[in-house]
Amino acid sequence: MPAPEPAPNRPGRLVGADSEQATSSATSAAELQAGQFGNAAATTEPSPEPAQRRRRRKAGVLFYSCLAWLVLVVVVAITAPWLPIPGPDAIDIPNRQAPPFTAGHLLGTDGLGRDIASRLAYGARVSLIISIAAVVTGIVVGGTLGMVVGYFRGRIETVVMAAVDVILAFPALVLLLALVAFVGQSLTAITAVIAFVSIPFYARVARATTLAVSQREYVLAAGLLGARTRRILFREIMPNVILPVAAFGLIALGVVIVLEGSLAFLGLSVQAPAATWGSMIAEGRRYLDSDAHIALIPSVVMFLTVLSLNFVGDVLRSRFDVREANL
Amino acid sequence: MGGLIAKKLLTLIPVLLAVSLLTYLLLSLLPGDPALLVLGGGAASAEAIAAVRADLGLDQPLPVRYLAWLGDAVQGDLGMSYITRQEVTGAILERLPVTLELMGVSLVLALVVAVPLGVFSAYRSGGRFDRTVTGATFGLLALPNFIFALILIAAFSVGLGLFPATGWSRLSDGLGDNLRAVFLPALALSVSNIAVFTRLLRTDMIATLQEDHVLLARAKGLPTSRILFRHALRPSSFSLLTVAGLQVGTLLSGTVIIETIFALPGVGRLLFDAINSRDLLMVQGVVLLLAVTFVVVNFVVDVLYTFLDPRIRSGAARARA
Amino acid sequence: MTPIAAAGSASRPGGPEGGGPLLEVRDLHTLFDTPRGIVRAVDGVSIAVDRGRTLGIVGESGSGKTVLSRSVMNLLPKRAALPADGEILFEERDLRALTNKQMREYWGPQLAMVFQDPMTSLNPVVKIGRQITEALREHLDLGRKEAQVQAVDLLRSVGIPAPERRLAEYPHQLSGGMRQRVTIAIALSCSPKLLLADEPTTALDVTVQAQILDLLARQQQERHMSMVLVTHDLGVVANRTDEIAVMYAGQIVEKAPTRTLFRSMRHPYTEALMRSIPRIENPSHTRLDAIPGRPPDLAKLPVGCRFAPRCANAQPRCLEENPPLFTDDEPRHEFRCFFPVGTPAGDEARQRNARAGRTAAGIDMSTLTKASA
């Protein structure tokens, strides 16, 4: 808040007449709102308070529902081998294409008679392993790269950022497809390739933040006090860079799940018969006219997971931004 | 103006060179010997392999191979597929119209849906319509295009029988059939663009609508539609253009999936087939084409932007003077 | 005192339609619901403007004068403001009862507005010609060519050189003063009966300010227009208005014919404003008197007089009771003060505070009397 001292006077004008920060924020806000055509800012929300509170509570419920869904997915993925479900590859011929709630098959079976619930659980493992590993690798490599070149600047920065720009010039999935085809379709290979494609994004964010942070006084001060470069990088700069980069992490998880799903859908992710959500959807295509649930259930699961990641990520990011603004 | 474009063109060349180099390097340094692929597996004799390598030019050092490939590529010759014995350039050109039409229709569809949604939800921001649209677009962002494609097929082809589920009709086979064939794939491809454009336009328009010049337009007694579409949409459409350019990357990626699902004979499908048959030169050629398209589209957007926004246009004129 | 004010007040009785004032605002309230509470931006304002006359509205930023002028224009989005009391009678018709669609008939040919900042009030991506002609074509049913001819005339009449060339230019190609001339041309295009000018010179260079004000005065006279001139600068309205209303914290605190106000102001706030006008007879570098403190938060208004916390005359009564508008022997002179300046009650109140060293609001008199000594 600005200190309540009288603003300097100007000839022929009222005190604070033309300096916005000298007026009370309330009144200038009201003047500003007078100019609104649409009614955007939350501050002018014309609806009475209860409606607003109800909406906020609804948003809170949504947030925790999303969080609960994500926890469920993670728990199921981890505990899949101990859950009372058939194996993901166990074939139950008499019960092929069984609808949901069939005895022994909670979510029904696919075209080969494999249990959908079980395949979803094991598919969640693939999705989670690939997405978490790829995002963490991307953040560590891309973040470090961006931080280092943002701090040292010079020729290395030019070279690295040029490389980053060139990688970004490729449509992501096209590059991914081309690489996966030739690198191979193991879990590690796919993770590595996705991480590689995502490095430029993290590098850009990390570099931009580093550029801003390294001009702050305490960082400059640390340099003047003779702190070692490594110490400045890891003690002063990294804590500031890691949050904005990590804030993208949750949303990036969603992006990676869709990318992996796309690969799997095209038959280019982890090889069959391993279950992945994308391959389940692809296999379910054949039964769209008779047994739509085979494609629908994994689709809904993937959609809800990505939606939850986006929503939780968005909420956390906006909370984080508020803290950033108050720094 | 011309000078400005020429200057920008000069910066385009190194980017294109770098893209071609990366395309070549990535696919050349990957494990696996193309010669083995040509010979169809492990059991070939060393002499046979060496012969094929010489035939493919693989015995040359990498820089030489790259320069030769680049030299040919600049002249429009992307080589001949090891696998199908087809000219890569010819195969691409034959399939390009399908992909271009698919992308074009998809972009138009996305704009036709997103512009009114974005404009009206900004106009009534905070209202029921706006909250519905904002919620719906948030959902669309989490909907992968292949899932959306299946929903469309289930609803409109399997369910209602309105559109073919797969296959393509050339424009020369009749406009109606052609449009029926392109509609569902284009709609499926536009899902993320609809969400991205709507949200961008809404945010941008909300800011524009609070500006004084919109208030002045109201104070002139102009009809609301004119204020929204003539006064507020124009400044907002510049950022829409930029983002549309960037979204071409998503579109290009999407064509691979969508053309595969709908069995369209386009470039995306060509890439998919080439990847499945480990057709290195074909993959190289298509990836190069797609990346170059992406770079060039964004270059064109950049230039268009300077043309369309009068503030930048005269700024450029001043900078040159 | 000045030719314009004198001519205005002496020679022109009502317009041809006769009868009451062109614009009469009665007990107008404009409230906004914000998370911090209800903001009373305009709180019971009554003003009237006769045909061909000029009313000045003076107040600090945050006094509600911009909201007032936009309320009068009926430009506030209906959903933004809470429903509240008051009437805005334009030719005896209540604008508040009109729909947006009906208002469109008024905006332009009846009411027009000039905004504060010409840098933002013109659309940056629409040519100047289009911005003028679209109003003409909307209201006067002109063809494209006719509208262009008229736009050229308008631009010439507001003193823009080479007007034909300007039509094809964009706002950023003009200087600030030229842009404000363009917005004035737009406002005048449909020959409005009432022109509201909201701080029309604040954003401009000092050298250009007088030119724009003179232009407005000249156009007003030529067109027999009524005008409301909103400003934070009492010096601006001194020579160019028939009547002045001083606003503070959403209310009119003093209203009088211009000459009366300058001769015998009654409200301590008006008095303080007067002192903040630089005077030629003073040596340059004389420290100008400021008003210490700041206006109250419009969402948390005090119980008593809204100016009491900054007032040298403040007495205990001022903290408990918001004064109503009083009148005295001068015709049309109203003020909202229990202890008016230049009256025995006011003088006594100030002396009492001076002796005590502080006002009833607890403000050290030395910070205030630097001003009143």
Image (cartoon, rainbow, N blue to C red):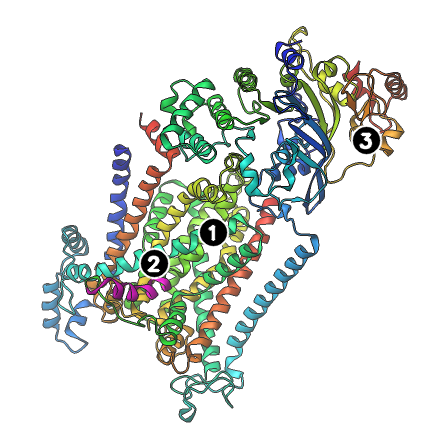
Is C181 magenta? The answer is no
Q: Which residue is mark 1?
A: B118
Q: What residue lies at 19% left-to-right and 60% top-to-bottom?
A: B92
Q: Is residue B92 left or right of residue A184?
A: left
Q: Position of residue B243 (x, y in %)?
A: 39, 49
Q: Is residue C177 left or right of residue C335?
A: left
Q: Position of residue C325 (x, y in %)?
A: 80, 27
Q: Is residue B203 left or right of residue B62?
A: right
Check the residue under mark 1 and report the chain it is in: B
Q: Position of residue A117 (x, y in %)?
A: 48, 81
Pick the residue in front: C49 or B300.
Answer: C49
Reply above or below: C330 against B29: above
Q: Are marks 2 and 1 in contact (CB under 8 Å)?
A: no
Residue C82 quadrant: top right
Residues packed near mark 2 inside 10 Å, few (<14), some (14 to 19) or many (20 plus):
many
Pick the residue in front: B231 or C196.
Answer: C196
